[in-house]
Image: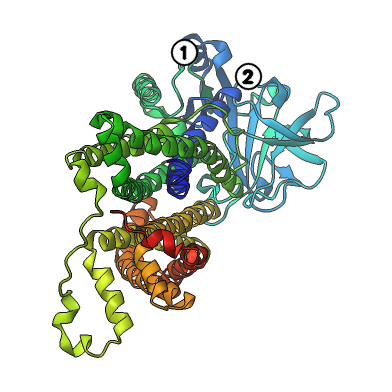
């Protein structure tokens, strides 16, 4: 049976591969992003809380002792942050060689970034080593779209110490990437009312300056917090700690979590957006797959009427006979699911690296994330097997003598268009015949229309998001990549759906097509006999797919919080329909050899 119905097996395999592969890839990418962020958080020992003093004097030594006793000295990092404009040449901290714009300065007592135990930065580039007692290591944040970096090898800073002014030099010691700032572009934390930050400078070994610099930042890691970053348990613990600190320290402090850090929170927000897109589109993918796979299996049972009758006559139980077809479906789903897992892993990685446009990405997590894969594969497997079992057991109610005879053809009757003489009488015979075939078999027509409608809607949704990101400059390049991936898989689903359903249609009608050949129809006439039905059915599905796609766009735009249906470019609607028609045309070309290889003698042999 596997050899005889290899095309059906391949169809099941392809549908499961495309659908489960896409579902797994979307679901995995969401989990992988969170896992990667969690591992980055652990590897860099990024603080869980940032406590900022609101007073000019900063934190007292008693305050610092309190934090070190509460969390452990190794889990507390104390520093100073200042923001100055145009070198602040007229203020108490005149700085030269920084250039124009706003500069954020961080001061730490540690000798360099390599000594950090909390918020461990990555040293991207090394510069000159400080010399003497009055030179300090100064590192700049690596270039981003907003930060211009630092060109030069020396910074000079002079502090006013009463009547005596002592000069301190800051040596450009290298470039770093702080775990608190791994956004490459559009970081709103670097925005001010008038302009953006031009530099971020980290100064180390600043103990001699401590008398002049208020300690206004304390970074805290909670050592016994082992839950995944941003999980419910993690946030409950962090928020409880935040509330307790605010109650103990009063209004003089602001306590921030990583939810208030733009790099971490925006990365998590992107993961949630992909997750939301995944849920909406996954439902459509799975419904289409279930529809097509169920159609394949129920029609396979109908084609196997004679085989079923023979097995009944030989004494096989109904359950034993049905198990044969359950095995066929299970093998197709199993092979498709196995391939889909690896396709999902690859898709997840492709989605992840799309965010290189926005972030200095954390390392891609290799932690398994099989939840979405298992969900979609099990849903398709259970639904298909249960439906196959139900259809098979229903078939077992028929007697062998009934099953050995071909099913009685459906009685001919007028279709709805024949009741409109003004339209019907103007049609030629070949179009009347085509429309009768299309409308007579309502279930086959409905299944094809629904499948094409869903896949066309997905194509439209993918194109609409691409249009918003690319042509309307809404959203980000990373989301453009995700939308492009959705579009590719929607196109694949569209092509596989049309191919599978049309292939089944041709297989069911071998005798009918062979009869036409015997009657003298030329090859191209027989091709067009089938093609006209495909094009009409697909056109109806595409027409229904545009409003369905509009609903999908509404859901997706609401979830992504950008874009609108009214803003979709006019050519997107036309392109979505044209792409579906192109897929239909390509499928007809692929099936042309199948029609022309029909064996007239075999097809017309009397089964009786």
Q: Position of residue 245 (x, y in %)?
A: 39, 21
Name the element at disc 1.
loop
Graded by Cα atoms within 10 Å as few (under 14), some (14 to 19) or many (20 or more), the crowding at tag 2 reads: some
Give left or right: position of 352 versus 486: right
Q: Does residue 145 sit above or below 452 in this rendering?
A: above
From the top left corner, tell me how far across and down residue 251 is, in percent: 37, 29
Q: Nearer the viewer, mark 1 or mark 2?
A: 1
Residue drawn at point x = 26 percent, y = 47 percent: 404
Residue 445 in the figure: left or right of residue 138: left
Q: Residue 226 versus residue 23: which sits nearer the camera? A: 23
Q: Which residue is mark 2?
A: 117
Mark 1 and 2 residues: CB-CB less than 8 Å, in contact?
no
Taking 559 as reference, is 425 above or below it? Answer: below
* 134 over 75 or under it: above or below: below
Res 224 label: 1
Which type of secondary structure does the marked residue at label 2 adopt?
loop
Tell me if residue 600 can be seen. yes
Residue drawn 60% across the image and 35% down it: 362
The reply, left or right, for residue 504 in relation to residue 56 is: left
Locate residue 457: give its quadrant: bottom left
Q: In terms of sequence position, does the residue under pointer 1 or pointer 2 come before the other?
A: 2
Residue at 61% of width from left, 44% of height from top?
84
Asked whether residue 205 appears in the rendered view, the answer is no
């Amino acid at each position: 049976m596997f050899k005889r119905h290899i095309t059906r097996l391949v169809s099941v395999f392809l549908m499961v591969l495309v659908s489960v592969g896409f579902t797994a890839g979307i679901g995995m990418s969401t989990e992988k992003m969170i896992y990667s962020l969690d591992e980055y958080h652990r590897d860099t020992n990024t603080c869980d809380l940032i406590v900022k003093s609101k007073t000019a004097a900063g934190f007292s030594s008693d305050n610092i002792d309190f934090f070190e006793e509460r969390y452990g000295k190794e889990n507390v990092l104390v520093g100073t942050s200042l923001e100055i404009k145009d070198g602040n040449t007229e203020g108490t901290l005149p700085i030269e060689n920084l250039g124009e714009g706003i500069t954020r300065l961080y001061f730490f007592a540690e000798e360099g970034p390599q000594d950090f135990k909390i918020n461990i930065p990555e040293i991207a580039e090394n510069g000159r080593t400080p010399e003497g007692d009055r030179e300090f290591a100064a590192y700049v944040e690596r270039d981003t779209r907003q930060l211009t970096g630092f060109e030069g090898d020396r910074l000079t800073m002079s502090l006013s110490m009463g009547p005596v002014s002592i000069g301190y030099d800051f040596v450009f010691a290298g470039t770093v990437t702080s775990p608190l700032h791994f956004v490459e572009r559009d970081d709103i934390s670097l925005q001010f009312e008038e302009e953006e930050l031009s530099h971020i400078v980290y100064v180390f070994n600043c103990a001699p300056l401590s008398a002049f610099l208020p300690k206004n930042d304390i970074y805290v890691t909670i050592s016994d917090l082992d839950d995944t970053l941003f999980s419910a348990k993690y946030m409950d613990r962090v928020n409880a700690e935040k509330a307790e600190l605010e109650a103990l320290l009063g209004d003089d402090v602001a306590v921030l979590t990583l939810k208030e850090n733009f790099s971490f929170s925006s990365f998590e927000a992107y993961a949630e957006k992909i997750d939301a897109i995944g849920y909406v589109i996954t439902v459509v993918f799975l419904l289409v797959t279930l529809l097509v796979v169920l159609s394949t299996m129920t029609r396979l049972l109908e084609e196997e009427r004679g085989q079923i009758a023979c097995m009944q006559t030989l004494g096989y139980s109904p359950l034993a006979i049905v198990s044969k077809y359950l095995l066929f479906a299970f093998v197709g789903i199993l092979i498709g699911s196995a391939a889909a897992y690896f396709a999902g892993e690859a898709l997840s990685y492709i989605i992840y690296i799309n965010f290189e446009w926005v972030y200095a990405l954390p390392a891609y997590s290799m932690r398994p994330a099989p939840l979405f894969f298992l969900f979609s594969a099990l849903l398709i497997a259970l639904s298909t097997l249960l439906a196959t079992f139900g259809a098979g057991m229903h078939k077992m109610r028929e007697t062998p003598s009934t099953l050995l005879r071909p099913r009685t053809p459906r009685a001919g009757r007028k279709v709805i268009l024949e009741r409109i003489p003004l339209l019907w009488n103007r049609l030629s015979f070949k179009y009347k015949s085509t429309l009768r075939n299309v409308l007579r078999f309502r279930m086959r027509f409905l299944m094809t229309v629904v499948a094409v409608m869903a896949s066309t809607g997905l194509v439209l949704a993918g194109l609409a998001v691409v249009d918003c990101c690319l042509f309307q400059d809404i959203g980000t390049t990373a989301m453009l990549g995700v939308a492009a991936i959705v579009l590719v898989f929607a196109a694949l689903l569209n092509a596989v759906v049309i191919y599978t359903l049309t292939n089944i249609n041709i297989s069911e009608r071998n005798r009918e097509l062979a009869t036409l050949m015997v009657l003298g129809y030329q090859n191209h006439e027989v091709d067009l006999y089938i093609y006209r039905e495909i094009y009409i059915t697909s056109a109806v599905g595409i027409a229904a797919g545009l409003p369905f796609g509009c609903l999908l766009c509404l859901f997706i735009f609401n979830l992504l919080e950008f874009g609108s249906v009214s803003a979709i470019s006019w050519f997107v609607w036309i392109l979505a329909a044209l792409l579906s028609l192109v897929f239909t045309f390509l499928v007809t070309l692929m099936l042309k050899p199948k029609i022309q290889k029909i064996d007239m003698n075999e097809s017309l042999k009397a089964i009786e």
